[in-house]
Amino acid sequence: MQNKKQFNFVKHFKIASIVYGAILVVGVILTIIFGVELDINFKGGTRFTYSYTGEIDVAEAQGVIEDVLKQSVTVSESSSISGDEKNLVVSLVADSSVSAAAQEEITAALKEKYPDQAVALLDSNSVSATVAGGFFAKSIFAVVLASLLVILYVGIRFRKIGGVSAGVTALVALVFDIITAFFSCVVFRLQIDTNFMAVVLTILGYSLNDTIVIYDRIRENKRLYPALSTEELVNTSVNQVKARTINTAVMTFLAVATVVVVSEFFGLTTLRSFAIPMAVGIVSGCYSTLCLSAPLWVRWRNYSDPRKKAKAAKA
Amino acid sequence: MKTKKTGKPVFFIVAILIFALTYLAFFGLDNYYGDNRIVYTKGASDIRWGIDISGGVEAVFSPDKEVSSISDEDMAAAKEIIETRLVNNNITDSEVYTDKANKQVIVRFPWQAGESEFDPAAAVQELGETALLTFCEGTTQDKVILQGAQDIERASAGIDENGQYIVQLELTQAGTSKFAEATARLQKQTISIWMDDTMISAPTVNEVITGGTASITGMADAEEANDLANKINAGSLPFALTVDDSKLQIISPTLGSNALNIMVIAGAIAFGIICILMILKYRLPGVVASISLLGQVAGSVACISGFFPNIPSFTLTIPGIAGIILSIGMGVDANIISAERIKEEFAKGRTIDGAISAGYQNSFTSVLDGNVTVVIVSLVLMGAFGTPDSLIAKIFSPVMSLFSSSITGSIYSFGYTLLIGVIFNFIMGVTASRLMLKSISRFKVFRKPWLYGGAKHAE
């Protein structure tokens, strides 16, 4: 079965894991340097409402305020029901000690930038996080529960090839993909908001599906060619599904990239925090499936099978 | 392998059904009588979009009573109940802030789709209601028998033996004994049932009720019964909240006013690119895959807009769109896996019919397993972040009750759109694709292995 044209993924596992380690190390260092920005929904903060007349460009106002405060803020526009009064709502993550000073700075900056628009502070609310503290605990628990159920399902469906090991190595790839997507937020200075949770979950779905397609092929080849060694079996299978994995990744990546390009073209920058980690996650998913989870599974199998272990030691 | 052949017309039937569904799901079916729009089926324009996409309403709620008596716990409870009420109305996108210093609750939620006469004041007023259900002696609220969550376990809408819509109540242990005592004492007298200050029913006691159940009759229709049951289940606010009308705001979309148009354009271009790539790469299976993908998207849209009368409409937000994108990705993948398999079968020297049959057969298990794992994930999410009395939430309640209930509509909507997307993936990506390809392959013009990814000069 093994032929020259096949790429030996199992053999190159060492290189793949070095790449993985490097990404991890660089990512952690960058996270420490840049820090993580959580949005107001997660941390609570302050909301200032300003009334104004005439026209104010929301994106421009946001830029002005961010320059003064050296921190990211969210600015939205609203109007009273009757429609004759216009407001800007500025939300920022801040504790109460910061907000009094921030308020003065924002007010001054807006008045200076828009002298003719009669900017006036209407209201100030210090708000607690909309997403309760229990949210993170529950999210993590939900993900763990879902993972256990997935391992259980994979364990039953793939029992012929040692289901639990397959399930666990699938999760290793998954964790890698989520971490990579998280690093992309750090690198691109994107705020972590509820959209990021959606991205994490999307990547979770893609990554699991990717890995399962490979295990499905391993399961099938195990039945067709029982004599193959674990390594040959995995290499053959990975090479067979390689075209599919890459094609799917290319198409989904292009679709997400299109969304980014089109929305940036029209000046819609708010989709970035959603689309960039998603695109990174898709690339990472393709890599981790081919180069990490399946080769890792070979190691696990060889390790847990003493007969093969002896053989591997001899070789 | 001798299987029953798929008839030639099947391709056209399936394709036409998909195109029809697509047209209806996107454009709906409506008619104008003068200025009145009569909607027969809802289209994509009836989707309720999230605040980020279409803007919405912001309201500041202040308590009626003295603020000093309100604790932080009361504020947290108020926030949770308002969130539950929003999700009960399928408004899965909302921001509910609490300002503990001023004892205010700030609520932002999106516009109702397509409603030009939407009255924000009325919608908001409902959110601030205490919604305290009480059972009282006689027709005044002086002597309370049963009250709120301490006596009433849960409510559900139902139909009684006469075919009338009712709300059935299950009482708590304390409620059961109080109700048994009261019904024994008040034979042939009136017990009135109140929602806040409104009497909704005043039945006469005919028997002693010891079973721990009670029912509210006189509901006009299923919707009214459902609404009342939801309201009771969501719980009552620890204090009434009123809205300062002068602070009621209309929020412009945070993504910008033309965000929706841009996203529709971006989505259409992305979809077009996927179709072109699939057709270039996989030829005939690519064409078939494009049609079935269209069907999958249409199906998802239909389940969100309220196209199907029994599936209520749903607020679509960025996470919801993420769920659709993931399911489309899964759909693309299912089609690619099958197309690659067909190609492989050709390489093994099979005939057209053999290759198509074997290709779909071999790809099925991986598509199945991939999709089932994603379904598991989506169900857990819906259970963890949906309303506590939805069916899925009940399955997971033994474990999830360990955590403080946090309803996060956005995550719930991700689970929802993902689940329906995957279901449509089975209908479209697996079944419809196979039927169409098998059927179209019977036409003489299409009997060339090249069209399926086989060698150009074979046969």
Image: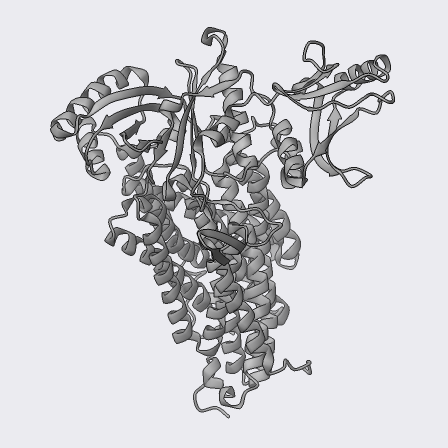
Q: Residue furthest front?
A: B34
Residue A186 occupies quadrant: top left
Q: Is residue A28 above or below residue B281?
A: above
Question: In the depicted view, which residue is nearer to us: B313 or A15?
Answer: B313
Question: In the depicted view, which residue is nearer to us: A52 or A19?
Answer: A52
What percent of the width, then of the height, locates residue A59?
A: 23, 39
What percent of the width, then of the height, locates residue A25?
A: 33, 41
Coloured how? one colour
| Residue A117 as seen in the image, left or right of residue B257 | left
Q: Is residue A225 visible?
A: yes
Question: In the depicted view, which residue is nearer to us: B333 or B422?
Answer: B422
- The residue located at (31%, 22%) in the rendering is A94
What percent of the width, then of the height, locates residue B278?
A: 42, 71
Q: Is residue B278 above or below residue A151?
A: below
Q: Is residue A197 above or below residue A96?
A: below
Question: In the depicted view, which residue is nearer to us: A169 or B52?
Answer: B52
Q: Is residue B41 visible?
A: no
Residue B109 occupies quadrant: top left
Q: Could you tell me how many numbered marks the image carries?
A: 0
What percent of the width, then of the height, locates residue B51?
A: 39, 39
- The residue located at (57%, 69%) in the rendering is B432
Can you say which quadrant of the picture contains the N terminus of chain B? bottom right
